[in-house]
Image: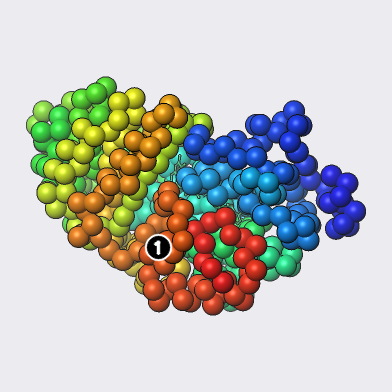
Amino acid sequence: MRELGELNGGFAGEVVRPGDPGYDAARAVWNGTIDRRPALIVRPTSAGDVAAAVRFARDRELVVAVRGGGHSIPGFSTCDGGVVIDLSRLRGARVDPEAQTARVGGGALLGELDDAAQQHGLVCPVGVVSHTGVGGLTLGGGMGRLQRRFGLTIDSLLAVDLVTADGRHVRASEDEHPELFWGLRGAGANFGIVTAFEFRLHPLDGTVTHGVVTHPVERAVDLAARHRELVETGPDAAWASFGVALEGGRPTAYVSVLHSGPPADAERDLAPLRGLDGALTDTIETKQYLQTQHLADEATAWGHRFSMRSAFLRSLPDGVVHAWIERLDGVPEGAEGGYSVWSCGGAIAAVADEATAFTGREGRYWASAEIQWDEPELDDACRAWGRAALDEAKPYEAVGRYVNDVAEVEDGLARSIYGDAKYERLVALKRAWDPENVFRLNQNIQP
Ligand SMILES: Cc1cc2nc3c(=O)[nH]c(=O)nc-3n(C[C@H](O)[C@H](O)[C@H](O)COP(=O)(O)OP(=O)(O)OC[C@H]3O[C@@H](n4cnc5c(N)ncnc54)[C@H](O)[C@@H]3O)c2cc1C
């Protein structure tokens, strides 16, 4: 890319333009509903390249999209006509086993961090699909099966290296630009491009107890009660997700668990969940943590069409479970839709909600309605199902929403994600670090 090089004293990365052989592959993102045509896709190989790309786009007043793993549900990591700064050449995770830390490239995928950490009997709590980007996941918060024990991904974040809207290199941590570091942990896509993350790691023997118990949907309320009992009285080593879904057209209820304590403790703690008569399947057994981190990869492969709605809930009453079972009937034919509720609390709730921009730590449950389909004709019906799917749970919502799940793009949404007080604090931060809103393809904090 000669223009980039001439203008900025050397851009060593790769550039893909419309008409190039790799253009269609390079512009594809995870969610198949998103089909945009950037003017330029650049793949920096260093923080210097990233800064050059930001300056280049600014000088030409081109819209900037930043791409980590490409999994943004509303398609924030691509654009029409602008520049995509694709971080896929800034990969890799390097672990310091003595210090129990990891340094991770801004474009790395979760699987790289998991593999590198587990080689030393360590772990960083991340999400449940290995092809998700560390970048977007972390900057929004980062939820996963170890969250009750080790907290959100941001709770293990020590520092980031950032390229700012004016092309400067900045490091943010509790000691360096602490206010910026506060905002990066939950609203991070607004303030710059992270070229490297540093995480604290936690010791985790690779063996965990994991699996799923399924029942006919008639037992959903009983199963939900046992899930509630585990969430509200069980140890932080136990994470469990309750859900209802259609299996081969038949409504079923399930609980999926991961217990990271000793197998004997897991057997004791999970016994009530497994003790409900008449299970259709029970796959709970000991396995490698790394194995569990790949189990959902294929079902969530690239290219399907997808929408969702989520909320943090203070409680999960039976009436809500009944409403969800009824709403399964409304999933359009040809689509797969369902509900899941993850246990939160534990280490997430041990951090004060004000401590980071992420908002929702008071929710005991994270509830999510997800729908996946392949036929474009179903777009409207599937999106409509997703939009209304959590209506009955509204009275039980906690303050805040998980920014990484918000599929809608509307003015004013960010205020409801962070709540009024935090939103004002984020606006002040945005004015300080990105007053011209260079980084606006996100749930935007308007300067
Ligand atoms: C299949 C699937 C599974 C998921 N599972 C989980 C889960 O278990 N837990 C969970 O918490 N979330 C989960 N999510 C949600 C996920 O956290 C978000 O979709 C997240 O935004 C993805 O990050 P990404 O880097 O892959 O996406 P991208 O689309 O590349 O980026 C998302 C946003 O982050 C910005 N961004 C990305 N990298 C950087 C960077 N280095 N510097 C600055 N900005 C950056 C982008 O500009 C964009 O606004 C899942 C999503 C999918 C599609």
Percent of width and height locating residue 292: 40, 36
In this view, 404 is above or below 374 = below
Please identify the quarter of the rendering in which residue 103 is found: bottom right
Circle 1 residue: 417
Residue located 57% across and 55% down the image? 441
Q: Nearer the viewer, residue 52 or 427?
A: 427
Percent of width and height locating residue 29: 57, 38
Residue located 27% across and 45% down the image? 389
Dot 1 amino acid type:
Ile
Residue density around tag 1, few if under 14, some if 14–19, many if 20 or more, within 10 Å: many
Percent of width and height locating residue 181: 55, 70
Q: Is residue 364 visible?
A: no
Residue located 27% across and 63% down the image? 398
Visual colour scheme: rainbow
Report the quarter where the N terminus lies: top right
Report the quarter where the C terminus lies: bottom right
Q: Nearer the viewer, residue 86 or 374?
A: 374
Left or right: residue 370 compared with residue 191: left
Residue located 10% across and 33% down the image? 218
Percent of width and height locating residue 145: 37, 47
Left or right: residue 385 compared with residue 324: right
